[in-house]
Image (cartoon, helix red, strand yellow):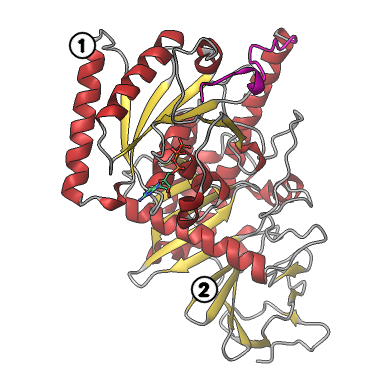
Amino acid sequence: MDAGYDAGTAYYPYTDPTEYYAAAAGTEHYAQDSGYYTQSAPVYDGQQQYVAGSYVYVTDVPVYSNEYATAVPVNYYANLAAGTATFSPFSAANVHQESILTLFYTIYPDPWSYEQEEEDHYGPGYEVGSYTKDYNDGPYDGESDLNVNSNPEGKPRILLMGLRRSGKSSIQKVVFHKMSPNETLFLESTNKIVKDEISNSSFVQFQIWDFPGQVDFFDSNFDCEMIFGGCGALVFVIDAQDDYIDALMKLNLTVTRAYKVNPNIRFEVFIHKVDGLSDDHKIEAQRDIHQRANDELMEEGFDSVNLSFYLTSIYDHSIFEAFSKVVQKLIPQLPTLENLLNIFVSNSGIEKAFLFDVVSKIYIATDSSPVDMQSYELCCDMIDVVVDISCIYGTKDADGAAFDHQSLSLIKLNNSTILYLREVNRFLALVCILREDHFARQGLIDYNFVCFRNAIQEVFEVRMQVQQASNNTNPSGDELIQPLNSVALKE
Ligand SMILES: Nc1nc2c(ncn2[C@@H]2O[C@H](COP(=O)(O)OP(=O)(O)OP(=O)(O)O)[C@@H](O)[C@H]2O)c(=O)[nH]1
C-alpha cells in the first residue's frame, strides 16, 4: 500500500495497522484525521528515538485521541545507511486498564481527560540542553526545589570537605558540570570556598560548597555556626589510594565540630578514587575506614552520629549513584515518590524504574526493589543517548527546544529487555527496565505513566503551598547566612 505522501505534504492514513509504508528519511509525516484522531497529529517529530546499529527508531504514541483504547501507536524507523524510512504501525493498542483504574481513579476520576492536561502543562519553553532558571513562586513547573531541609536561602546546602587533592572539586565538576574525568587532572587546588548553585541545571535545587583541603576549624574566622548551621549534608571525601590515617583524623574533627553545631546534618563519607583498587582492596578499605571512624566517634561519646560510606570514583557511575543517595536523603517527599513508583511499576509490569534528574543523571527516587549498578548504568547511558540524539536529530521548535511533552524513547536489548524513557518534565525523566513481552501492553504503561506524572505534580503543588504558607508566617526571611566573602579562611 502506498504511504500517501509526496515531497511537500506527507499524510499517513491510519487505516490498516498491519501495513508497512515506505517514506523518505527525515521527511515530516502527518496523520490524517481517520477516526482515531480528533486532529492531525505529527507522526514523526524526531523526538522519540532509539538507535540500534545503523537504524534510528522513532516511536510515536498518538495522544490526541479521545478514545484512548483505539489509539494506534506508530513505529517509524530510518535506516541511516540506506537513507530510507519505514512506518510500521503496531496492532491497535490493546489497553487493559483494570488494575490502574482501581489505583488512580480516586485521584483521577476521568482517565480520558489526561491528554488535554498534558498539553496544558507544558509551555513552549520546554527544552533540554539550555535550562533557564526562574526563582519565582508559581505553579509547579519542574524547576522548584524539593527540599524543606534547607537553609534560610531556601536551598539545602551540601558541603564537600576532605584533605587536599582528595577529589572534591573533581566530583563536583564531573557530576554537575559534565566535565570529563580526564579533564580533572588539570584542576587547580581550591583555596577558598567555592559555592555552586545547582539550581541552574537541575530539578533538585541545592547549593554545593566546595571547601579547600586546608580549611582550619580553629581559625577564629571560620564561622562554624554559619557554615554548619544551614547544612543538609556533609560529604567527606577520603582518597582511598593514599594513606588515609590523616584523612580519618580530619573526618573525626569535622564531624564532631559540625555535629555540635547541627545534629541534623547527614554525614556521608566517600571512599574515593577506588578505580585504582582491586575488588578485595576496596572492601578491605571500606571495612577498615568504617570501623576506625566509628570507633573514634564512640570513644569521644558521639554514639548517635551516623556515618554513611560509599565507594566512589569519577571514572565510573559510582559517583553518580552515591550522589543520588546523598540528594535523596534531602528530599522530604522521597517516601511519597517511592510509593508512587512502586504503584506504577507493580501495575505496569515494570521491573525497575528510576526517576532521573536528566542533567546530572542522579536519580532522585526509585522503586523499592534493589538497585543493581548495571541497571543504573544502563539507564544513565540511555539518558546520554536520548539527549544526544534529540539534540542532533530532533525537530526543534522556535525556542530551539529538542524535547517536547510527548518525548519518549525505547531501547531493545538483546536479552529481551526493554529500556523505556519518558520525560516527566523539563528536568526529570522516568527510565524503566522491563521485559519485552510486558511491553506488548504499551498503552497501559503509557496511561499509567500519565497518572504517575500527574500524581508527582500534585505532590509538588502541595509542597509549594506548604512552603508559601511558611513564607507568609515568616515574611522577614532574616538573612542568617552571611555572604561568602565575609568568611575568611586560612590559606
Ligand atoms: N584515579 C582517580 N583520580 C581522581 C578521582 N577523582 C579525582 N581524581 C584526581 O585527583 C586529583 C585532585 O583532584 P581535585 O578535585 O583537584 O581535589 P580537591 O580535593 O578538590 O583538591 P583541593 O582543591 O586541593 O582541596 C586530580 O588530579 C583528579 O584528576 C578518581 O575518582 N579517581
Circle 2: residue type: Val
Instruction: Please tell me whether mark 2 sits on a helix, a strand or a loop.
Output: strand
Within the magenta stretch, is there residue 488?
A: yes
Mark 2 surroundings: few (<14), some (14-19) or many (≥20) residues within 10 A: some
Q: In which quarter of the image is residue 472?
A: top right
Residue located 56% across and 28% down the image: 193
User: Looking at the magenta stretch, what is its main secondary structure?
Assistant: loop
Please say whether residue 306 is visible from this viewpoint: no
Which quarter of the frame holds ligand 1? Answer: top left
- Residue denoted by label 1: 299
Q: Residue furthest front?
A: 491
- Left or right: residue 277 compared with residue 201: left
- Residue 192: quadrant of the picture: top right
**Nearer-the-camera pick, 277 or 93:** 277
The location of residue 146, given as percent across then percent down, is 58, 30
In the rendered image, which quarter is residue 145 located in? Answer: top right
Pair 2/1: label in front = 1
Q: Name the residue under label 2.
A: 51
Q: Give the range drawn in magenta.
A: 475-491
Q: Mark 1 is on which residue type?
A: Glu
Q: Do the residues labelled 2 and 1 touch (CB within 8 Å)?
A: no
Distance from mark 2 CB to nearest ligand 1 atom below 8 Å:
no
Q: What's the residue at 73%, 66% (across, down)?
A: 37
Quadrant occupied by the N terminus: bottom right
On residue 79, the disc is none
Secondary structure at badge 1 equals helix
At a point 71% along the width and 12% down the height, the residue shown is: 477
